[in-house]
Amino acid sequence: MAVTIKDVALRANVAPSTVSRVIANSSRISEKTKKRVRAAMEDLGYHPNIIARSLANKSAQAIGLVMPSSGNKVLQNPFFPEVLRGISMGAHEAKQALYMSTGETESEIFQEVVQMVQGRRVDGIILLYSKVEDNILSYLKAQSFPFVVIGKPFKDNDSITYVDNDNFRAGREVTEYLIGKGHQNIAFIGGDLELVVTIDRLTGYDKAIRGAGLQYRDDYIIHEEFLQQGGKEAVHELMSLEEPPTALVVADDLMALGVLNTLDEMGISVPNDISIVSFNNVLLAEMSRPSLTSVDINIYDLGYQAIRCLIEQIESPYDMVKNIKVPYQIIERNSCKNLVNS
Amino acid sequence: MAVTIKDVALRANVAPSTVSRVIANSSRISEKTKKRVRAAMEDLGYHPNIIARSLANKSAQAIGLVMPSSGNKVLQNPFFPEVLRGISMGAHEAKQALYMSTGETESEIFQEVVQMVQGRRVDGIILLYSKVEDNILSYLKAQSFPFVVIGKPFKDNDSITYVDNDNFRAGREVTEYLIGKGHQNIAFIGGDLELVVTIDRLTGYDKAIRGAGLQYRDDYIIHEEFLQQGGKEAVHELMSLEEPPTALVVADDLMALGVLNTLDEMGISVPNDISIVSFNNVLLAEMSRPSLTSVDINIYDLGYQAIRCLIEQIESPYDMVKNIKVPYQIIERNSCKNLVNS
DNA sequence: GTGAAAGCGCTAACAT
DNA sequence: ATGTTAGCGCTTTCAC
């Protein structure tokens, strides 16, 4: 059996409660006994049992992370390691542990969340995605359990704390950027329409197209999973249109890489024959050939801000709602061609 | 306050222990009372407090994951999400939760591990890397706490349970593969020499080179971090040699992508001017141009087998050591050229 | 400034 | 087949 607070108390000739106070560094304990107790802890190699502490003071010192079904290939998107980095950093600063969901299906994940919450295993939860109808979100809200969403909630978004980019504006600006380069036929290759981020970017694209007096064409809109596989099919469909696009707005760098690949196979040159702008600006964007003009959405910050918000929310008794918009910027590289003389 | 086992007991007219037994689905409880108790749980919306349970039966139902310093960019390597997928799957099957380390520096991570272990927060630990001198590993071993290593431990590897590929053999075979294609000047671009995987692959390379009666040249060996940035510098150094290599063994697909990129900038064509074989076979390998001949090391299985081993180790009272070699296979694509007529 | 004692919610002997 | 009773290791009133 491991060494407990009692052993320390015994050795230091104090009561267990005193040892507890020393751990919490209570000001009501004299420096002298503190020293004595600390020496005893040292001697015995004492380490507090976190589980016992959690039970006594009803706080787990852990944050729950809810992924979009971990069996899913979505994890392969470089987005996730990068948000994780940001979250890790914040968790580490606040001395919080991270607890990950492992469920496969949606209902399994739901059960896990219920267990995290009711089992008091975590003090708060971060949802690493935002989709249209989400009963996990509804549940958390109903329980008024501390949580924050990465991405904009589909509804009730003024009563939910979330961290997001302004994806609508980003979608619009990116499209306007291409229009500014003289493109008139711009297609949109987006991810899962269940994800709010896709909807927002598409809406922004739409706005820009119509705003420029161009025609919004349904056959220019393609949705596939946020993965490379989807890219290929999308491109084939698109390029076989009578009037193929001269520019593409692609939801994601990984997808864009797939697109690039397929275009190459088809003998279509980027940026000479077609221009591409994508989102996320992960390492790939820089490493592909041609390198991709991509919207840097500051993924790391998304994660870091999310956990900061969550920790504030846990600490503060009043639950004020907070919405953080992480800035983004278009990083110009070599995947876009100017059609007009500038 | 949440509803507890006592509330359920009261409502079902049984003792708390009976409720506890119903939760554990003990065979010593009559179906009739089970039904009654379950109904009570349902009515009250009862969910067991996992923390309390952990304290009582000294098992956390959670596995600790130790990453190589999470602040580190290493996380960006697609290797990690993929092992995570495998681990997640196994954790999920065994109803184990996952705890992640969040530390930045090595000593911080060490402290976290001590807390996980002494704080009884986890029942076992998976080390997601294997490096040369590792005090975390030594500590775990000294405590005889259940753990498994992904990758081969540097020493004591017959007293430590680990899951790995045969990286020595893989390194050798890959090199022989290139030799078989007529290459005589083969360079090795490896990752961090602190990592055992690098050492093993390099040793295999060495073996193949000497075995074929070729000369082992120090200036053909380059070590950089497992990241794209490293790739560029490495290639420049290498190609400015008097007798530049005609083939490259690269530690990692991501790194190989960087290499590809740099070669392209330098106007060197792959595979016409130089051949490349890399390791890991992540999505990138398929999506790059030219697509990369890469060693598929079955990353997912690495993770899955690791957690299976760990769970066995936790459950079985006897700690028999287990070493699992996950098979690998060379996936041929378009980055290698045959120099001889075949 | 320190100690005694109750209790967090559950499990696991030991009874019956 | 079920109830009684101690804990698990810690925190936290309430005394002194």
Image (cartoon, coloured by chain):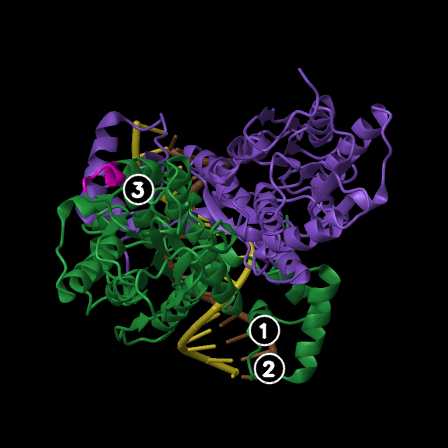
Chain colours: A green, B purple, C brown, D yellow
Mark 1, secondary structure of its residue: helix
Residue A222 left/right relative to B333: left
Disc 3 marks which residue?
Answer: A225
- Residue at the image position 19 percent from the left and 44 percent from the top: A243
Answer yes or no: are tags 2 and 3 on the same subunit. yes
Query: Can you see residue A96?
Result: no
Disc 2 marks which residue?
Answer: A29
Quarter of the rendering containing residue B163: top right
> Nearest the camera: A132 or B22?
A132
Disc 3 packing (10 Å; few <14; some 14–19; many ≥20) = some
In the picture, which quadrant includes the N terminus of chain B?
bottom left
How many numbered marks appear?
3
Q: Chain of mark 2?
A: A
**How far is the residue under mark 3 from the one under mark 1?**
58 Å
Q: Are marks 2 and 3 in contact (CB under 8 Å)?
A: no
The disc, 1 or 2, on the residue closer to the chain's N-terminal end is: 1
**How far is the residue under mark 1 from the one under mark 2?**
8 Å
Task: Look at the image and give the residue range highlighted in magenta.
Answer: A237-242
Q: Amino acid at mark 3?
A: Glu
In the picture, which quadrant includes the C terminus of chain B?
top right
Residue A244 left/right relative to B302: left
